[in-house]
Amino acid sequence: MARSEAGIQQTERLLCELLDAEVECVVVGGVAAAIHGCTRLTEDLDLVAPLTFANCERILGVLQKYRPRFYQTLGRPPVERDAKALSEFKNPYFDTQLGIVDVLGSLPPVGDYARIRSRSIAIDFEGRSLQLVSLDDLISVKEAVGRPKDREVLIELKAIRDRLKGKVR
Amino acid sequence: MKPKEGSREPPPERAVRLIWRQVWYSALMQQSDDIDRRAYFKSLPSYGPDWDFAIEYGVDVMMLERNLAFSYEARLRNACNGIRFMAKCRAMNEKLYGQV
């Protein structure tokens, strides 16, 4: 499991702050799997977001308060770039005092933010509207990635899909 | 008695058999110390091939049912509580064995 600088991932607070700052994003990855009903625990927060200048500015506006560092760069250097430089990234991966945030510009094989957003579902979270990747899209992504560690999550997600159809055989 | 045409209800005999099996297995599981509960899960209604495969793989489908009974928001909160608990366990581990 990934570990943030602070030690404890504060996903709820991260999400609240990002939503309050009107960051455009869709929750994907392990957190999305948990919201869909999976039993596996995951720590880092994976988001698909348009990496436009405006959205990167909003993301940085939130994360700058929590000493962001580039999580997967050797030595974890502090994030000192501006929104323009950040918008040239494909997958900025931050380690902050609130935890780890992985921002993806697109999610193969489903597609880019616009496509994922159009198929996502809005859920209520602490009085805010949170966009959650659809169950079918999450299954497609996990199938495409094909890592052994995703296998159990994939099996659970597919079982959940069967259960939600609700037809007893 | 035949079910109505187009009805999704299982025939009564099958429904009775399913209920009986569930009651029997539930009683059995209360007494059982077997950690492999696949036989019990298989006695429950099946929702499709992926559901059955998950049971065979060893997924605790009762846990999935439990999660699905919560709202989306509650599931997220539960997951975050789990992460906090894991962090506490890790801190205890570090106390025991020192930081690696």
Image: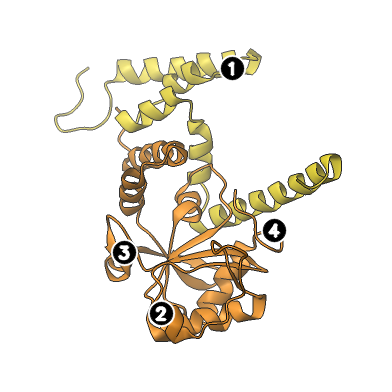
Chain seen in orange: A
Label 1 sits on a secondary structure element that is: helix
Query: What is chain B's hue in the picture?
Result: yellow
Residue type at numbered disc 4: Ile
Q: Position of residue A20 (x, y in %)?
A: 54, 80
Classify 10 Å Cα crowding around label 1: few (below 14), some (14-19), many (20 and above).
some
| Cα separation between marks 1 and 2 | 56 Å
Chain bearing tag 4 is A
Q: Do labels 1 and 2 share a chain?
A: no
> What's the mark number on residue A8?
4
Nearer to us: label 4 or label 2: 2
The residue tagged 3 is A116
Q: Which badge, 4 or 3, is on the more N-terminal residue?
A: 4
Q: How far apart are marks 1 and 4 (CA)?
A: 37 Å
Q: Which of A52 and B4 is in front in this view?
A: A52
Distance CA(mark 4)–CA(mark 3):
29 Å
Ranked by sequence position, the earlier of labels 3 and 2 is 2
The numbered disc on residue B29 is 1
